[in-house]
Amino acid sequence: MDSGIRATVAFGGDAGCPVARFAESTGATVDGISTSVAPAGDVVTEFLIDAKAGESSAPAEPVFSYGTADVYRVEHGEECPCSCLGGFGCPIHQYAAASGELTLVFHAAGFEQLQAVMAALRDAYDVDVKRLLHPPLEGRTEERLFVNRGRLTDRQLEALCTAFELGYFERPKRANATEVAEELGISRSTFAEHLAAAQRKLFEDVLDGL
């Protein structure tokens, strides 16, 4: 059975999410959230903010108070990415909404569903994948990173794979840069450019957050 993938995605702006708009109007950071997803994809969210933050600028009345915080409830319209995720049956694990910007952490059943979800999100929003986790993996939670090979262009992936297959990364090397470039039918400088770009993208995934 596929253990699923947890994805963190960030949107360029509030993306039509009422939670992000609420955060922008109150100046509060919203990150303590419970979410319900109906079979039709409807999403209702409840969240806590400091009572003082919402008392003068909240666009809605709180549902109830909880100590020094107020609980608010919003319904997500069809234009919201949360409803898009609800339509795929992908649970949202965490929100981070502040200054009108939105970050979501959600769970996809596998790579096929993740690809379909991301295609739908990219069609409708300015969205960036920040992190993918594919448990169970060894190591501490913060070390469990998924390297997104899809960030590489076809030529970058070809250069990386050919270099690996010919032993370019071994010590001592079984092939030098000139030999790998000849195998690829490109110049040595072009090979170096593709390889450097591929390594930079992979290192960004591996070293993110360190």
Image (spheres, rainbow, N blue to C red):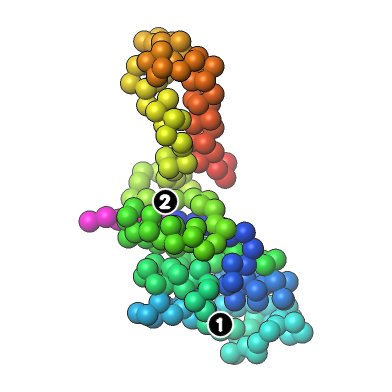
Residue 92 in the image: above or below residue 208: below
Q: Judge left or right: residue 203 versus residue 99.
A: left
Q: Residue at x 51, y 52 (%)?
A: 129
Q: How many marks?
A: 2
Q: Taken as a whole, is the magenta stretch helix, strand or loop?
A: loop
Q: Which residue is mark 1?
A: 74
Residue at the far left: name it: 1
Residue 12 shown in magenta: no
Q: Quadrant of the N terminus?
A: bottom left
Q: Judge left or right: residue 124 versus residue 154.
A: right
Q: Which residue is mark 2?
A: 133
Q: Amino acid at mark 2?
A: Leu
Residue at the far right: name it: 56
Q: Which residues are magenta?
A: 1-6
As helix, strand or loop, the secondary structure at mark 1 comes to: strand
Identify the image quadrant of residue 54: bottom right
Q: Residue at x 35, y 79 (%)?
A: 39
**Pointers 1 and 2 in contact (C-beta within 8 Å):** no
Gap between marks 1 and 2 measured at Cα? 29 Å
